[in-house]
Image (cartoon, rainbow, N blue to C red):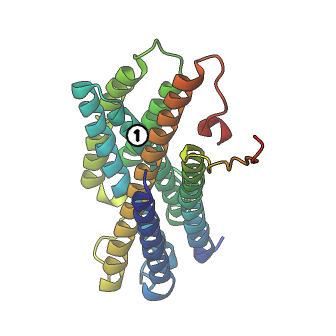
């Protein structure tokens, strides 16, 4: 295998591993934030008779 | 975490990705080929940056473990866990990029010399630290045992550092190189430092968020009627 191919493999592997972990953390963090935020207020529909 | 904190986290990640993009561009277009080794020496930038940041992350875990034993605060335990995950990832990158270089430079994937062996032991120790945290422990004991394990694991860090310093020819290093190579190495060090800092901070915040969410659902519904938590969703 050529030296250039080995360099490309090394950088692709390293960056994909680290950035993949970063992406998974950020997605889970966003999900956790969404889960934690309070639900939107529910409008109560009332009629004059009630 | 409020809206202000989320904005800071996003800005931090944009800065980190920009630094990484700049560092990658420098490796592709700015760094000249080494006159003796050729293009293969370009691996050194990611390898060395990951290696130095592995040792920095080990120090963060060690400090968090000491602080936990001193204060018994779960935030230190969460920081130690976040740091150990980054150590395992970065050390894996160091080992794999080093092996790719060794195959081209030496004609073999591995040599049992002291820098490589101590680096492998470091990776195994911190992988063991993370596995140990997943084992069933009596309530309240997991964090304390993990902290003790982490402090013992840190004993390998000076061995890695000293073995690399004492056997400079036995591993990948930049040595006496062109100024472009040194500048690129500095940018890579900064980029991976920001990346590992961001990974530790985001993992720490995620642990704090999920534990706070679990505690609130536990208080509302009791232990038996617990709805799905974000950790279960993830």
Residue at image point 35% right, 67% down: B189
* Horizontal relation, residue B214 to residue B77: left or right: right
- Front-lying residue, B81 or B115: B81
Outermost residue on the front side: it is A49
Judge whether residue B105 can be spotted in this image.
yes
What residue is disc 1 on? B122
User: In the image, residue B123 lies at what x, y percent?
Assistant: 45, 41
Label 1, secondary structure: give it. helix
- Front-lying residue, A19 or A27: A27
Q: Is residue A5 above or below residue B139?
A: below
Residue at image point 54% right, 44% down: A36
Judge whether residue B44 can be spotted in this image.
no
Outermost residue on the left side: it is B70
User: In the image, residue A29 lies at what x, y percent?
Assistant: 54, 50
User: In the image, residue A32 lies at what x, y percent?
Assistant: 56, 46
Give the chain letter at badge 1.
B
How crowded is the residue under tag 1: few (<14 C-alpha within 10 Å), some, or many (20+)? many
* Horizontal relation, residue B159 to residue B134: left or right: left
User: Which quadrant would the C terminus of chain B be assigned to in this image?
Assistant: top right
Residue at image point 67% right, 40% down: B233
* Horizontal relation, residue B39 to residue B148: left or right: right
Q: How many numbered marks does the figure carry?
A: 1
User: In the image, residue B8 lies at what x, y percent?
Assistant: 40, 64
Residue at image point 51% right, 83% down: B28
Rendering quarter of residue A26: bottom right
């Amino acid at each position: 295998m050529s030296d250039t191919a080995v360099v490309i493999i090394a950088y692709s592997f390293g960056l994909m591993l680290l950035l993949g972990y970063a992406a998974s953390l950020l997605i889970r963090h966003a999900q956790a934030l969404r889960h934690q935020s309070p639900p939107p207020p529910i409008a109560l529909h009332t009629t004059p008779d009630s | 975490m409020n809206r202000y904190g989320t904005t800071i986290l996003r800005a931090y990640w944009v800065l980190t990705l920009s630094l990484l993009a700049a560092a990658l561009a420098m490796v592709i277009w700015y760094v000249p080929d080494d006159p003796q080794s050729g293009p293969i020496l370009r691996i050194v930038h990611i390898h060395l940056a990951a290696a130095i940041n592995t040792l920095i992350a080990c120090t963060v875990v060690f400090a968090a473990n000491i602080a936990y034993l001193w204060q018994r605060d779960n935030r230190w335990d969460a920081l130690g866990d976040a740091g150990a995950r980054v150590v395992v990832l970065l050390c894996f990158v160091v080992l794999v990029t080093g092996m790719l270089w060794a195959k081209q430079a030496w004609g073999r994937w591995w040599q049992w010399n002291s820098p490589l062996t101590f680096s492998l032991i470091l990776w195994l120790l911190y992988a063991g630290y993370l596995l140990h945290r997943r084992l069933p422990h009596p309530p309240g004991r997991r964090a304390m045992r993990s902290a003790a394990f982490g402090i013992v694991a840190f004993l390998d860090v000076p061995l890695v550092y000293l073995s690399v310093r004492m056997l400079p020819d036995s591993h990948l290093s930049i040595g006496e190189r062109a100024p472009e190579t040194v500048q690129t190495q500095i940018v890579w060090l900064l980029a991976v430092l920001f990346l590992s800092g961001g990974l530790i901070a985001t993992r720490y915040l995620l642990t704090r968020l999920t534990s706070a969410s679990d505690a609130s659902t536990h208080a509302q519904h009791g232990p038996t009627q617990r709805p799905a938590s974000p950790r279960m969703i993830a």
